[in-house]
Image (cartoon, rainbow, N blue to C red):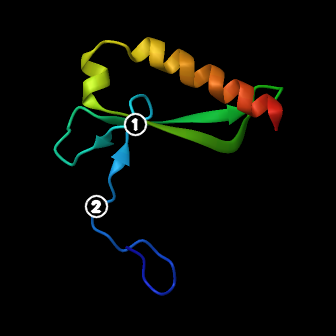
Amino acid sequence: MQNEVGDMVDLYVPRKCSATNRIITAKDHASVQINIGHVDENGLYDGRFTTFALSGFVRAQEEMEQVFDIFYWCCVLAYVKT
C-alpha cells in the first residue's frame, strides 16, 4: 500500500524468489537476499548493484551454485548491452 506521497507504508512487503518466482513468506527463515555489485572495465565498483532473493526451497535443493551462474551471466549480458 502507498500513501499520498507514494511511499511504501506496509509493514511487510513480500519478496519473490529470483529462481522460482515463488513468493518468499515471512516464515521462510532460510531465504537470503544478495546484492551483487557492478564493476567498470577497471574492476572498480561503480555504485550500482543487482539484488537477488532466493527462497529456502532453492537453498535446500543445493542448486545455489547453478542459480548464481545463471544470474551472473544474465547480469553480465545486461551490463554489456547498456
Looking at the rendered structure, the secondary structure element under dot 2 is: loop
- Find residue 44 and report its horizontal and vertical position in percent: 75, 32
Quarter in which the C terminus is drawn: top right
Residue located farthest toward the front when viewing the structure as drawn: 21
Check if mark 1's residue and mark 2's residue have beta carbons within 8 Å. no
Q: Is residue 80 above or below residue 28?
A: above
Q: Is residue 63 above or below residue 15?
A: above
Which residue is label 2 attached to? 12
Which residue is label 1 attached to? 21
Q: Is residue 8 left or right of residue 45?
A: left
Amino acid found under the numbered disc labelled 1: Asn
Q: Quadrant of the rendered structure where residue 74 is?
A: top right
Looking at the rendered structure, the secondary structure element under dot 1 is: loop
- Residue at (20, 37) in percent of width and height: 29
- Numbered badge on residue 62: none
Amino acid found under the numbered disc labelled 2: Tyr
Instruction: Measure the C-alpha gap from mark 1 to mark 2.
Output: 18 Å
Q: Is residue 62 above or below residue 15?
A: above
Residue located farthest toward the left when viewing the structure as drawn: 27
Q: Earlier in the sequence, mark 1 or mark 2?
A: 2
Badge count: 2
Q: Residues within 10 Å of mark 2 (few under 14, many from 20)?
A: few
Quarter in which the N terminus is drawn: bottom left
Q: Residues within 10 Å of mark 1 (few under 14, many from 20)?
A: few
- Residue at (25, 29) in percent of width and height: 56
- Residue at (33, 38) in percent of width and height: 22
Q: Is residue 25 above or below residue 20?
A: below
